[in-house]
Amino acid sequence: MSGLTFDEATHTYRYNGNVVPGVTTILSPLTDFSRVPPHILRAAADFGTAVHLACELDDLGTLDMDSLDPALTPYLAAWRKFSAEHEVEWTLIEQPVYHKAMGYAGTLDRLGRVKGLATVLDIKSSAQLYPSVGPQLAAYQQAAEHPTVQRMAVQLKSDGTYTAKTYTDPTDWPVFASLLTLRTWCARHDITPNFKD
């Protein structure tokens, strides 16, 4: 999208030079990782990034299997299995998107067709699919300039299997929009929200 940039090192989105909040940052109040040691969180994030890159390069037909870390092989096998079994056709792969009216950005993993249905999809390598995935996908769906009828997450597992889940909760988008509205209001009034009891 013209005007949208992403600084991977700082995980910062800008639209026409102005910093805008990202989807995962907006949803951060819904997930508490405060009990997980920071080095564990970093390692998990780095591994998830590697899984995403392997799947992206594979979908683009440019993956060099000889250079693939063996730890990623079962996750890639799970992705290939899902893709074959669900007859996927991708229009967008790892595409940054921006919602002009709401002023937020994010990077959707996949947009295209899954078994013929227009779908926005997120790839996960985490141990579970957290409840915040529903609002996350709703945010991508609203920001994408392509209409979709289905929101889906695919959890890739270390044994080469996957779990695919569709999200249909009609409150997912209002939850995301409410968090964004609260964040924007607090920033305007220089308030740090306290979500703890």
Image: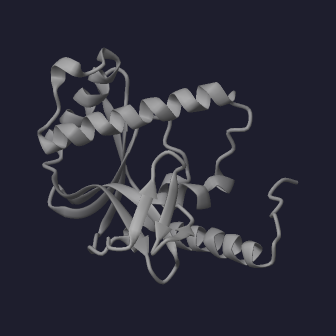
Q: Nearer the viewer, residue 126 or 40?
A: 40
Residue 148 lies, with reference to residue 88, above or below; the image says below
Q: Residue at x 20, y 63 (%)?
A: 117
Q: Nearer the viewer, residue 67 or 112?
A: 67
Query: Looking at the picture, does residue 115 appear above or below residue 53?
Result: below
Residue 112 location (% of width, % of height): 21, 60
Vertical comparison of 134 with 17: above or below: above
In the displayed image of the protein, which residue is found farthest to the top? 70
Count of marks, rendered view:
0
Does residue 137 appear anywhere in the picture? no
Quarter of the image containing the N terminus? Answer: bottom left
Based on the displayed image, in which of its 4 quarters is residue 40 positioned?
top right
Q: Residue furthest bottom?
A: 101
Q: Could you tell whether 58 is left or right of 158 in the image?
A: left
Task: State the residue at coordinates (37%, 32%).
Answer: 50
Q: Give how far across and how far down residue 51 sits, in percent.
A: 35, 33
Q: Quadrant of residue 179?
A: bottom right
Image coordinates for residue 162, horizontal then vertical, percent: 32, 34
Q: Is residue 62 left or right of residue 193?
A: left
The residue lying at 23 percent from left, 27 percent from top is 77
Q: Quadrant of the C terminus?
A: bottom right
Colouring rule applied to residues: one colour
Q: From where the camera sits, is residue 44 visible?
A: yes
Give the farthest residue toward the right.
197
Which residue sits at x=25%, y=42%?
56
For this rendering, which residue is in front, 109 or 84? Answer: 109
Residue 156 % position (x, y): 35, 34
